[in-house]
Image: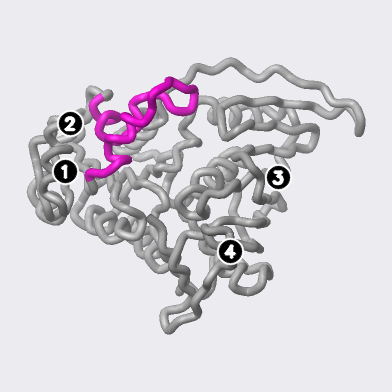
Amino acid sequence: MSFRAGVIGCGRMAGTIDDEIQTQHNDFILPYGHANGYAALADVDLVAAADTLPDKLNSWCDRFHVPGRYTDYREMLSAERLDIVSVTTPAHARAQPLVHAIEAGVRGIYAEKALCVSAIELDTIVAACAAHDTHLVYGAMRRYWAGFEAARAFLDSGALGAPKAALIGATSGSALHTHSHIVDAALYLLGDPLPVAVNARLRGRDGGDLQVLQGAQGIEIADDPSIIHAVVHMEDGRRLVCTDLPSLDIEIVCEEGTLRNSGDSSYWVPRKSQSRYDWQELPFPAWQARSGTVAIITDLMQALTTGAPTRSNIEVVRRGMEILFGLVVSHHAGGAAVDLPLVDRNVRVMSH
């Protein structure tokens, strides 16, 4: 079966990001952008693209040999009978074309992260996916990297006992744009538990105090903030702790040891506790690096063929987004714990 694919937003993640990857690295195996990911698979054809800028659209389509060209994505959705649509617009312009694609009958969505910039937008997307039985995959792709996949299998094997907590370094990136990646990765390694509460302190991207507005439409932040410290509590008692460290490390603390990922890379060190002062380093299973983008698209095509949920399905994405919006509400409440899902859905964070 061959799938017809289209792209909304002919920017960096749509294809040209591959130009930036000059050295093959286990975490960044080409193809990385959406267009080259589709081109690598025999059972999918990239047949159309839409962008509001005609020159950008034509240049992009010429490069990636895309015949259908539209400055209005709604015309593309009406004319092309697409099975899959990538939505690679900036986050603040993502929710509307994503929902329109679902309502137009597109069965598979490949959405970049962050999924959206408000809790109300999140609700609209989740409801649309449920109403139309639409499958979704998500650009927070660490759960598709082979090293993270091997780490999840290692944890599931029970070699270190049950995972109890994830510790992640937030460095200086932004909460929605950057840390949607590591929040999703930590949830994946913990087994995708249900988050039930969060407390957090944030700062502005410039390092200064974060300006949070309580307007007529609810809580609003004009710029995607950075995380100082956050604790996410899960339904099963597990925790996700995120703090301002100089690197994007992830450590999973288990009943009988730890599994550490260094430098946001697929480099893993498992250690088992023999006693309080006696730790044994364990071998980590061998794995083969592969393109995360190809793995994402393959997962989506399998879902469209079999009906099984994708690894980054809408419920998994919803949990991560609830955490990110919860960070903002908790910060606005002086760092107090807030329950998830948020009762008041009027929270919005501008993200690019």
Residue 67 drawn at (x, y percent): 8, 36
Q: Nearer the viewer, mark 2 or mark 1?
A: 2
Q: Is residue 88 visible?
A: yes
User: Which label is found at residue 49?
Assistant: 1
Mark 1 and mark 3 lie on one chain; the one further toward the N terminus is: 1
Residue 273 lies, with reference to residue 121, above or below; the image says: above
24 falls in the magenta region = yes
Q: Earlier in the sequence, mark 2 or mark 1?
A: 1
SS for tag 2?
helix
Q: Residue at x 49, y 23 (%)?
A: 26
Q: Between marks 2 and 1, how big is the CA–CA gap? A: 10 Å
Residue linked to disc 4: 208
Cα separation, mark 1 vs mark 3, equals 42 Å
Query: Which one is nearer the viewer's eye here, 203 or 180?
Result: 203
**Do labels 2 and 1 touch, CB within 8 Å?**
yes
Circle 4 crowding by C-alpha within 10 Å: few under 14, some 14–19, many from 20: few
What type is the residue that disc 1 sits on? Answer: Ala
Check residue 281 for magenta coloring: no
Of badges 2 and 3, the one in the foreground is: 2
Q: Which residues are magenta?
A: 10-39
Indicate the quadrant containing the C terminus: top left, top right, bottom left or bottom right: bottom left
Q: Which residue is mark 3?
A: 165
In this rendering, would 53 be left or right of 186? left
Report if the CB atoms under discs 1 and 3 are less than 8 Å apart.
no
Amino acid type at mark 3: Ala
